[in-house]
Amino acid sequence: MTYENLDAKLINALLGDGRASLRSLAEELDVSVTTVSNHLRDLEEDGVVEGYTPIVNYDALGYDVTAIIQLKVEGSKLPDITERLQEEKQMISVYEVTGDYDVIAVGKFRDTDGMNKQIKSLLTDADIRESNTSVVLNAVVENQQFELDIQEE
């Protein structure tokens, strides 16, 4: 098994169970625990694996309103706006993008009143020239990760 294939198989195994023990990963991949440990350490050091976190179903916790907020921002103020959005705890994704808008942010809210309040607070910023907000009706796929392709040996 090549180094790259082992790394891909290790990543795929972790996507299946992020809490798997080194021993169970070694058994699944048919390598030693030391090999798994060394490869996992390298993947972490290289920033490929950035942590082990639970996948939280925010809908089940009452945050069942998802909003997609598109913003046109005064050019030089883009870093200030993205930093401000990043600091808002309910903004789960913030992107600088190409196209008609400069920023797209995705937020989770308990209700439309909470969403409205946060968006109106954001729009008081004079550096935001225009906004467009869409409320998600149905999340078909969310927070999806994908397995890596394994090269045939």
Image: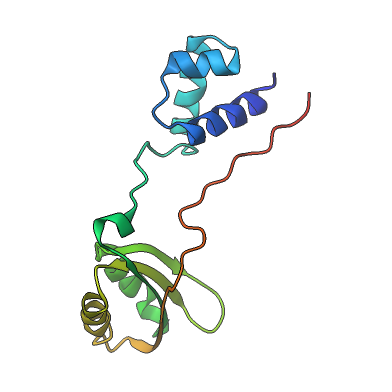
Q: Is residue 54 above or below residue 34?
A: below
Question: Across the whole image, how many numbered discs are drawn on residues?
Answer: 0
Q: Is residue 149 left or right of residue 107?
A: right
Q: Is residue 106 left or right of residue 122?
A: right
- The colour style of the image is rainbow
Locate the N terminus and report the quarter of the image it occupies: top right
The residue at 34%/41% (across/down) is 54
Q: Is residue 80 above or below residue 28?
A: below
The residue at 48%/25% (across/down) is 40
Q: Closer to the camera, 58 or 11? A: 58
Q: Is residue 94 above or below residue 112?
A: above
Q: Is residue 76 left or right of residue 40?
A: left
Locate the C terminus and report the quarter of the image it occupies: top right
The residue at 39%/68% (across/down) is 106
The residue at 50%/51% (across/down) is 144
Rendered image quadrant of residue 123: bottom left
Residue 102 position within the rendered picture, expressed as x and y whole percent measured from the top left: 46, 78
* Residue lying at the far right of the rendered structure: 153
Residue 80 position within the rendered picture, expressed as x and y whole percent measured from the top left: 31, 73
Residue 41 position within the rendered picture, expressed as x and y whole percent measured from the top left: 45, 24
